[in-house]
Image: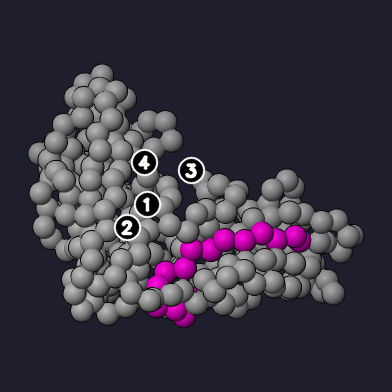
Amino acid sequence: MRLQGGRRLSRGMLPALMGVGLMLLAAGPAPAGFAVEMTPARLELKVEPGKTARAAVKLRTRERMMQKVEVSTGAFGLNDEGSPVFDNPKDAPVSAAKWITASNQEFKINPNQDRLLRLEVNVPPGTPPGGYRAVVFVAPPKDDPKSKKTGANVFLVGRLALLVYVTVGGATPDGTVKSWEWRQTPPAKLENLALQVTNQGTAHLRLAGVAKVTDSQGKAYDAVVPGVPVLQGQTRWVSLEFVEGAPTPKSAVSIDATIDLGRGEKRINAHVGDRK
């Protein structure tokens, strides 16, 4: 790598290209003191081989003291529940970590100050079309480990993770809804209506869609298909987010959904239970 210096999902559809979302890294407790916010905390870029994409993230600390940070990169993947998995060797072939150059490797953020971290993603010439990804870590220096819970952000080891998705060339997602079930999908504690999605494309899929769910009494409920990612080659369950009220778990329902699976919106009708 060339380094020169690194909410519960909304009920509306998330944009296809740049969005926000903070990741947690859990590796044991550390002394309190690291309180940095980052926006956005996800980048989704389309870049041709041999070209460069540029982006910036804003860092801010609400602490009364100056905060030191350092920047590094690594590989990441997603497990079947959609949680990030970092530095897994199987993700190395699609890692974009070595493509990323940061404007600063180490710097300071003064109290209530906004600092921009500028990033360049340099895709090497001849890179095959496909979906690639990397994580940019923003953390206190290694000799000053800290942890802090503040506002909407939780840092268990004092480390923020910016997820970077890079689609190279003509790579495209190709999703298919395999089935629907009443299912408990972590971190939910109760069963919810969920769809199983497979991405057979060459780039990651960012889901988007809406659904109307009708129970056996004819009562209709509006729901959103959350804008979560499905990596190429991955199959995962995704729970609907109901807007106001929801059917009784395990009840028979009919589903009328419009979902973008990477090839434009598609109308999907399905039944769960004996509802016909």
Instruction: Determine the main secondary structure of the stretch shown in magenta.
Output: strand
| Mark 2 residue element | strand
Which of discs 2 and 3 lies nearer the camera? The answer is 2
- At horizontal 74% and vertical 73% (from top left) the residue drawn is 269
Nearest to N terminus: mark 4 or mark 3 = 3
Q: Distance between the residues labelled 4 and 1?
A: 8 Å
- Residue position marked by numbered label 1 in the rendering: 42
Q: How far apart are marks 4 and 3 (CA)?
A: 12 Å
Say left or right for 57 vs 250. Answer: left
Nearest to N terminus: mark 2 or mark 3 = 3
Nearest to N terminus: mark 2 or mark 1 = 1
How many residues crowd around disc 2 within 10 Å: few (fewer than 14), some, or many (20 or more)?
many
Q: Which of 218 and 156 is in front in this view?
A: 218
- Amino acid at the residue labelled 3: Arg
Please identify the quarter of the rendering in which residue 50 is found.
Answer: bottom left
Q: Distance between the residues labelled 2 and 1?
A: 6 Å
Q: Nearer the viewer, residue 3 or 265?
A: 265
- Residue 129 belongs to the span the image colors magenta: no
Please identify the quarter of the rendering in which residue 217 is found.
Answer: bottom right
- Residue position marked by numbered label 3 in the rendering: 7
How many residues crowd around disc 3 within 10 Å: few (fewer than 14), some, or many (20 or more)?
few
- Residue position marked by numbered label 4 in the rendering: 39
- Amino acid at the residue labelled 1: Arg
- Residue position marked by numbered label 2 in the rendering: 164
- Residue 205 belongs to the span the image colors magenta: yes
Q: Which of 138 and 82 is in front in this view?
A: 138
Q: Distance between the residues labelled 2 and 3?
A: 18 Å
- At horizontal 75% and vertical 67% (from top left) the residue drawn is 256
